[in-house]
Amino acid sequence: MEEIEVLVNRLIGEGQLLQAVLSGPRRKAPDQASKIKVKPVLLKGKLHYQFSSTVGQKELHDNLEPAPAALKLAELLREAFKQGLLQSAEADYQVLVNKKGKAALLRKPATRKPEEAGLSHNRRKNYLLEEGVPVPFLVELGVMTREGKVAAAKYDKFRQINRFLEMIDDVMPALADKEQIRIIDFGCGKSYLTFALYHYLVQLQGKKVTVTGLDLKEDVIRHCSALAARLEYSGLRFEMGDIADYSDAGRVDMVVTLHACDTATDAALEKAVRWEADVILSVPCCQHELFGQVKSETLAPMLTHGIIKERFSALATDSVRARLLELVGYRTQLLEFIDLEHTPKNLLIRAVKQSPPDKETLARLAAEYKTFRSFLAIDPYLERALADRLGDVLAGRQDQDADRP
């Protein structure tokens, strides 16, 4: 066994390990991994080794720097598994352990190339949920096979899920100090992204999370609740209900609203602001409100065409929402989101709670908004809904309330 430990330390210490696969656990227990896959990844520019452990239907991940990774891999080979395959550019090394704990080490020609290791791990180019690594909820939803292969007909959905998780990953610093993260997902629908969100935060990030998915369709809620129970996602629950009427929440850290139709998006944004949610993620849908309001002689050549007016009104609606969120204390971005159920591409509003801007900046943002609103002759729902929070700011009386979030 000493020979194997020396090998592990050399391969990891010199950065030569491309992949390791451990199988054949030596004991049977509910918490025992049936298989562990180890691979190099770059996290924030530093080399780590990701241990992906299959425990029942769950996939658990742990990222370790080289020294502790070598210790853990050697320990697993010494105490927990009968077989191990260590792959490097120079050779494949097969470890076989008999019932008495005696290990044999076999060297074979290399079968894996360095470029296959994915060492240039970049969260923008490589997916957070990787093809080839089975993810239980994706298997249950038909996106993956049990071997981790993405179904051809579901590959776009796989890309969409990963794009969504990239956006979640970007806002994790805003939630770093939370012992438990409370999330409300309005209009969860079939819940591909709800399950992805829960899996990412709990299984990959190790966070304590409670997620409530809300939808109006009874059959959808029944299906999603059954799936959550089957996956043993104890912190994920689904309820029937309308966004505008929902009030069963105390502290909320994140509000997600995907494809809430027309002003239902605004109702969800209002809820999020009043809950003082740290993060808001919203993909609007079917924005009709401003279509019937927008008037401008200057824009008449464009607004006389229905399809152009519809698209312009949708963009204006999201621009209004973003600015109003800024005026009540959020840093807001409009991002392109892969969306397959409505349009080939869509916008996602991502807002993160921050300290209020200084008086001068707040006054400028408010003035720009009022000019835009007057130019288009619009009266947005969200402004009316947040009138008590926006009144002084839009009236130029923000001085007395500058410290209010």
Image (cartoon, rainbow, N blue to C red):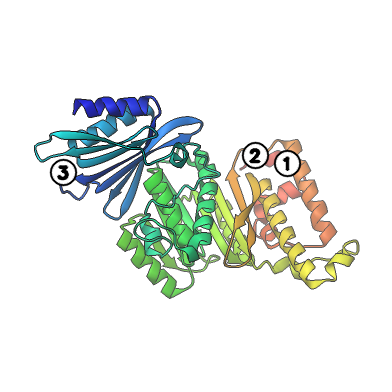
Residue corresponding to mark 1: 362
Residue type, label 3: Arg
Marks 1 and 2, the one that precedes in the sequence: 2
The numbered mark at residue 26 is 3
CA gap between label 2 and label 3 equals 57 Å
Dot 1: what SS?
helix
Left or right of residue 223: residue 271: right
Q: Nearer the viewer, mark 2 or mark 3?
A: 3
Q: How far across and down, in percent of the image, does residue 268 sit?
A: 57, 60
Say which label, 2 or 3, has the lower sequence index: 3
Q: Residue at x 47, y 35 (%)?
A: 42
Please tell me whether mark 3 or mark 1 is closer to you in this view. 3
Pointer 2 with pointer 3, Cβ within 8 A = no
Label 2 sits on a secondary structure element that is loop
> Residue 101's image quarter?
top left
Whether residue 293 is visible here, answered yes or no, is no
Residue 119's spot in the image, x, y percent? Answer: 47, 36
Q: Amino acid at mark 2?
A: Pro
Question: Mark 2, residues whose alpha carbon is within 10 Å: few (<14), some, or many (≥20)?
Answer: some
Distance CA(mark 1)–CA(mark 2): 8 Å
Along the viewing direction, whichever of 236 and 267 lies nearer the viewer: 236
Q: Which residue is mark 2?
A: 356
Quadrant for the C terminus, please: top right
Q: Nearer the viewer, residue 45 or 392?
A: 45
